[in-house]
Amino acid sequence: MFEKLLIANRGEIACRVIRTCRRLGISTVAIYSEADALAPHVALADEAYCVGPAPAKESYLNADAVLQIAVDTGADALHPGYGFLSENAGFARACAAVGVTFVGPSPDVIDRMGDKVGARAAAVEAGLTLLPGSQDEVSDEEALAVAEGIGFPVMVKAAAGGGGIGMRVARSGKELGEVLKGSRSLAENAFGSGKVYLERFVEKAAHVEIQIFGDSQGHILHLNERDCSTQRRHQKVIEETPSPRLTEDLRSRMTEAALMLARHIGYTNAGTVEFIVDDEGRFYFLEVNTRLQVEHPVTEMVTGLDLVELQLVVASGEPLSIAQGDVHSQGHAIEARVYSEDPDTLFPTTGTISELLEPVGPHIRVDSGIAVGYEMSPYYDPMMAKLIVWGENRGEAVARLDQALRQYRLRGFKCNIPLMLDILAHQDFIGGSYTTSVVEAVAEERASRGGDDKQTAAAVAVSLALELRRRAAVQRTSSSGSNWKREGLRSLMASRQAWSR
């Protein structure tokens, strides 16, 4: 195992990697920008060094500066987290060139999967089904003809990068020109490449990903799925496992498809194979994320595995410490991303945290990168923390998440907790039939009642949601008679009584 690890990231993911390293006895090196000098990850690490000014391009994305710190401190490995340099094949190769192990897949795989057009081609070779789309990047001149061949609406997607950046929907030829222009601009600024391609847009879609792991000995396994359909601007807000919409047959076929692709490309370390699932249960390949995902804690909550530890084991050259038959999931886990953003406009907010009380209790986990006095700046992603809960069943997990969100005390600027409470109270979310448009539906409902100003309307919505949950729990319990479902119902009723007070 490694002796010293540099974490080329910030915030909650840096803190989370440090926790595993401490347990394994690995010394940690943090980097920070001038804006992050007082950030919690700086204090948690064994060593910390300033990597540059506040703008990410001059600090966390400054590959030469990051690597120099790794060399100067004697780090024998580097964990990139997610975002920033995590899917930069050139950076991974530079790490290898100076004898620092990059904790992630090989540079060749990052290159191949990082170009979404190339990833689609690899998926076809492996036998996966794709949504109708362009075979290669499209120019402005050919885009209309290609879009008409696919059929509107179409999604314009950046060929490089991820995180929903550069993804826009065109519903007609009239809209296509402006959508292309906007997507190219965002992609160029974020990834240094304005290449885009087109793909059919599925209106009533679910976004489901399969967690995969591979080692250098050729062993490949999956850790089941996560449902990531609760999104705004094509970026995830709430994730859960297991997916409420997958049958055992569909789950089996999707995990096997993910493994087929992983074997075909020789995948190592952690990654996810992303799929779109339509309302008829058909699934289509989207992309591969060649890194640890933000939402990995829900998988950890149901499997009992430490995914960062598995990453480090594989990166050190050791075989995976588990086989497919050792992977067992128990219960249900949900993660809510806490953003510093206005719950009505969904625009980022900034300010200094004047009060912070994070929820605690059984089966509640908070991965946080903030503290009182910390300033949320405009330079980075507005995600502050992740709240993850576990329950014996989905109803219990949803109720626990609702209760935990209400325990949060966060002052200094607006955050998205009110929006997430409304999502949990939405009938489609309660029933598990929600799609990628659920946040838009909730936002429209909030706008119609004036956001959080009309407290009575909000209270009615919560009461209705709890009653629907109660009825669903009663129906499930009466039909099955199982003890764990009866316990889930008792938990729901206890929570309802507590909130009513």
Image (spheres, rainbow, N blue to C red):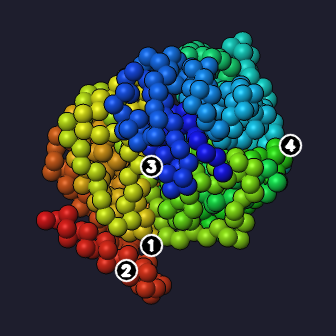
Element assignment for label 4? helix
Give the residue type that dot 4 points to: Glu
The number of numbered badges drawn on the structure is: 4
Name the residue beneath numbered marker 4. Answer: 125
Q: Is residue 299 visible?
A: no
Dot 4 or dot 3: first in sequence order is 4
Residue 104, x across and y down, in percent: 67, 41
Q: Decide: marks 2, 3 in contact (CB < 8 A)? A: no
Q: Nearer the viewer, residue 430 or 28?
A: 28
Q: Nearer the viewer, residue 116 or 354?
A: 354
Dot 3 or dot 1: first in sequence order is 3
Name the residue beneath numbered marker 2. Answer: 487
Q: Residues within 10 Å of mark 4 (few under 14, many from 20)?
A: few
Dot 2 or dot 1: first in sequence order is 1
User: In the picture, residue 111 is in which quadrant?
Assistant: top right
Rendered residue at 82%/54% (across/down):
217
Name the residue beneath numbered marker 3. Answer: 238
Name the residue beneath numbered marker 1. Answer: 392
Dot 2 or dot 4: first in sequence order is 4
Q: CA distance from mark 2 to mark 3?
A: 25 Å
Rendered residue at 41%/38% (across/down):
41
Give the residue type that dot 1 points to: Glu
User: In the picture, residue 145 is in which quadrant?
Assistant: top right
Rendered residue at 67%/70% (across/down):
326
